[in-house]
Image (cartoon, grey):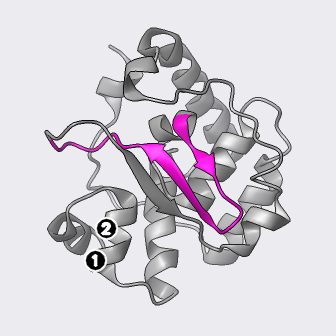
Amino acid sequence: MSYFKRIKKDAIKKSFLSEDQILELAVRVIVNPTYGWITTALIIYGCRPIETFSLIPSSDGTASVVHFGESQIEPFRRKVLANPSDFVEKLNIVDQVSQPFFFENLEDYDFVALDDFMINWNIWFKSMQNNLELSDLGKCWARRIINSGISKKLAAKYMGIPFHEFCSEFK
C-alpha cells in the first residue's frame, strides 16, 4: 500500500507543540540536506507534505503550491502564507531552496518516485519529533495562523480546505 493511501484522517488528538517549540523544530530540522528545507516549509507554510515538492516561495511571505485538495476542479496553484512570516527571511527559505524533487504542475508529479521518499521522510521526521506526523504540521500552522488574527475563512483558503471543514477541525 502506498504512502498516499496510508495517510489517515486521524481524529485522534495528538499532543501538539507550542508555537515556540514548533519554531524551534524548524530551526533544528532545516540543516538536514535531504529533508530539512521541505520539513521547514511544512512548518512555515502549512501545506500538505505532497505539496512541498511544488512550493515556490516569495520574499513577501507567500508561496504557491500545486493544490492537492479533494475538490473535483482542475489542478491549480494555490497561494499559501508563511507564519510567522519573518521566518522566511530568518531561515533563508527563498534563497536556499532545497527540494529533493520539484514539480511545476500536477502532470509532472512522479508518484512512484515519491512513494519511497515520502515513507523515508516520515521515518526521519518521527526520529526528530516522535509525537507528530508530517501531516500534523499543517494543523500546527492552522492553530498559529488563527492565533495571529487571520480569519478562519482566509486560513481555510490558504490550507486548501473547505471553510466548514476548517471550522469543525479548528474550533
Q: Which mark is residue 169?
A: none
Tag 1 and tag 2, C-beta contact below 8 Å: yes
Q: Is residue 27 left or right of residue 140?
A: right
Please give the residue where the numbered disc 2 appears in the rendered image: 156
Q: How far is the residue under mark 1 from the one under mark 2?
A: 5 Å
Q: Is residue 48 left or right of residue 75?
A: right
Name the foreground residue: 63 vs 23.
63
Q: Residues within 10 Å of mark 2 (few under 14, many from 20)?
A: some
Q: Residue drawn at (47%, 51%), measured in percent from left and top?
A: 47
Name the foreground residue: 162 vs 9.
162
User: Percent from the top left, x then y, of residue 59?
Assistant: 71, 63
Q: Residue drawn at (31%, 79%), measured in percent from left and top?
A: 152
Q: Residue drawn at (43%, 84%), measured in percent from left and top?
A: 150
User: Percent from the top left, x then y, of residue 38?
Assistant: 65, 41
**Extreme top residue here?**
112
Q: Residue drawn at (33%, 42%), measured in percent from left and top?
A: 76
Q: Which residues are magenta?
A: 54-71
Q: Quadrant of the N terminus?
A: top left
Name the foreground residue: 27 vs 93.
93
Q: Is residue 98 magenta?
A: no
**Residue at disc 2, secondary structure:** helix
Q: Residues within 10 Å of mark 1 (few under 14, many from 20)?
A: some
**Residue at disc 1, secondary structure:** helix
Please give the residue where the numbered disc 1 appears in the rendered image: 153
Q: In the rendered structure, which amino acid carries the disc numbered 1?
A: Lys
Query: Measured along the vertical axis of the image, is residue 166 above or below residue 48?
Result: below
Q: How many marks?
A: 2
Q: Quadrant of the C terminus?
A: bottom left
